[in-house]
Amino acid sequence: MAQQFEDKFNRKFYYLRLSVTDVCNFKCTYCLPDGYQPPGHKRPAFLTLPEIKRVVTAFADCGTSKVRITGGEPSLRKDFPQIIETVANTRGITKVATTTNGYRMTKQVDTWRQAGLTNINVSVDSLDPRMFHQITGENKFTEVMSGIDRAFEIGYEQVKVNVVLMKDLNAKELPAFLNWIKDRPIQLRFIELMQTGEMDELFNKHHVSGTDIRNQLIANGWILKARSQNDGPAQVFVHADYKGEIGLIMPYEKNFCESCNRLRVSAMGKLHLCLFGDHGVELRDLLQEDAQESALIERIQAQLQTKSVSHFLHDGNSGMTPHLASIGG
Ligand code: SAM
Ligand code: SF4
């Protein structure tokens, strides 16, 4: 193995979030409220299978064991099963996860599992079909729920469900969400609404502090699980009366970045050291057939030395990220 990816703050990176498309078929209010807008100019194609193979191999050779395939909506790629297979067949990769809006799960999750997908996160912002429609812009609640059922049917032992709670929209559903996981092995992941370039107003209107949610959980007997060394920034809570768990993702909490263990590659082949960084570093020229893996690793290692200790969200600075669909959330 080449040298493990590590930055100057001794953070080790074993987790790659790989975006495979910017395109999405939903219009989530906090992400792509007007839907996916193709750029005015002709954009380069998204990463191809051979490029994906090369980038994942280099990461695996430097200690990465988990890859999350994300987007945009990753399942919109026709070759999504082949992407999963390519990642799963890379030596050193033991976990292949995806984050999806779940729209295609009922029909396709069997194929994803056969291709080697080990973990699934589905975004479900409401258990009320009308609110789900209002937040995502799509009337697809029933399809998404049946996709989750299908994942359990075919053998996934746990499914993670991402929820962004928002004031005056779905925040009042916290008790309904808790009730939902009483008998289901679902890890609910409450992601605190993050401010991105294009949505100051929405943020100010709907942001719910993760601390409020945490206080409500503690008051209801939820207990914080001890962290193991490789755990990411989520705080996981458990409760004796519930089969499910809760993960709290609170990017505004002090020290959130201390446990950062992930790097990102965009669908255009740019390395992002932080979700809220101010630039992406071109890797694509080194993902071509005639390029050397050692040069790719060297470029990533050099960039890692410039990774900041933390993001600057507290200063209202979300870097260059216009919305999370652009580099995969
Ligand atoms: N389309 C897929 C989905 O929605 O699951 C994957 C991409 S999406 C960008 C990944 C995750 O980011 C979703 O769970 C979504 O809820 C979350 N997300 C997007 N914009 C966000 C924001 N401004 N604040 C917090 N979470 C956000
Ligand atoms: Fe699409 Fe996911 Fe963004 Fe919603 S959060 S618009 S499903 S990329």
Image (cartoon, grey):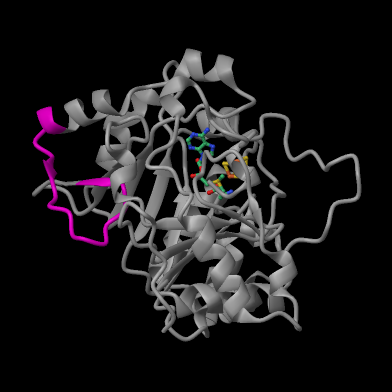
Residue 275, placed above or below residue 67 = above
**Residue at the (40%, 29%) spot, across then down:** 165
Q: In x, y percent, where is residue 156?
A: 37, 70
**Residue at the (57%, 50%) spot, across then down:** 328
Q: Residue 145 versus residue 116: which sits nearer the camera?
A: 116
Q: Is residue 176 left or right of residue 60?
A: left
Residue 133 seen anywhere in this rendered image of the structure: yes
Residue 78 seen anywhere in this rendered image of the structure: no
Residue 228 colored magenta? yes
Q: In x, y percent, where is residue 287?
A: 69, 73
Q: Is residue 111 left or right of residue 121?
A: right
Q: Is residue 183 left or right of residue 196?
A: left
Q: Which residues are magenta?
A: 218-236
Q: In x, y percent, where is residue 77?
A: 71, 63
Q: In x, y percent, where is residue 71?
A: 61, 53
Residue 302, placed above or below residue 1 = above
Q: Locate the N terminus and report the quarter of the image it occupies.
A: bottom left
Q: Which quarter of the frame holds ligand 2?
A: top right
Residue 31, placed above or below residue 144 = above
Q: Is residue 9 left or right of residue 195?
A: left
